[in-house]
Image (spheres, rainbow, N blue to C red):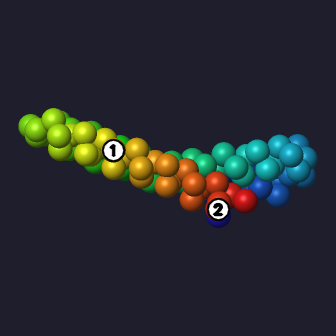
Amino acid sequence: MFNSKFSLKQIRGYFGEKIALYFYFLHCYTRWLIIPALLGLIVFIARMMPLDAEYEDDISAIYCIGIVIWGTVFMEYWK
């Protein structure tokens, strides 16, 4: 699960538990950021299309709600 040159156990053994937890959090957070990045790409492409202003506002509102849900799910996962 922790794919890098050093394993999480090696980091914990060398730097300690707090630093290893920090690196593990960054690892999980970076992987979870793929979801809002893909959603943002979809919204960007949709906004580049010639659409009416009301539809663009709907897309932005849906994106905002999606980000809020993503953040909540990520924080519950991390607990």
Q: Can you say whether 60 is above or below 66 in the image?
A: above
Name which quarter of the figure residue 52 lies in.
top left
Q: Position of residue 8 (x, y in %)?
A: 77, 55
Nearer the observer, disc 2 or disc 1? 1
| Front one among 31 and 66 | 66
Q: Secondary structure at mark 2?
A: helix
Residue 7 tag number: none
The image quadrant where one finds the C terminus is bottom right
Q: Residue at x 15, y 35 (%)?
A: 53
Label total for image: 2
Q: Secondary structure at mark 1?
A: helix
Q: Position of residue 42 (x, y in %)?
A: 28, 48
Q: Can you say whether 79 is above or below 37 in the image?
A: below
How far apart are the two marked residues, 2 and 1, measured between alpha carbons?
24 Å
Q: Amino acid at mark 1?
A: Ala
Q: Position of residue 40 (x, y in %)?
A: 35, 43
Q: Residue at x 70, y 49 (%)?
A: 25
Label 1 Cα crowd, 10 Å radius (few <14 / some 14-19 / many 20+): few
User: Mark 2 highlights which residue?
Assistant: 77
| Front one among 55 and 79 | 55
Residue 61 tag number: 1
Q: Residue at x 40, y 44 (%)?
A: 64
Q: Amino acid at mark 2?
A: Tyr
Relative to 27, 9 lies left or right: right
Label 2 Cα crowd, 10 Å radius (few <14 / some 14-19 / many 20+): few
Relative to 39, 16 lies left or right: right
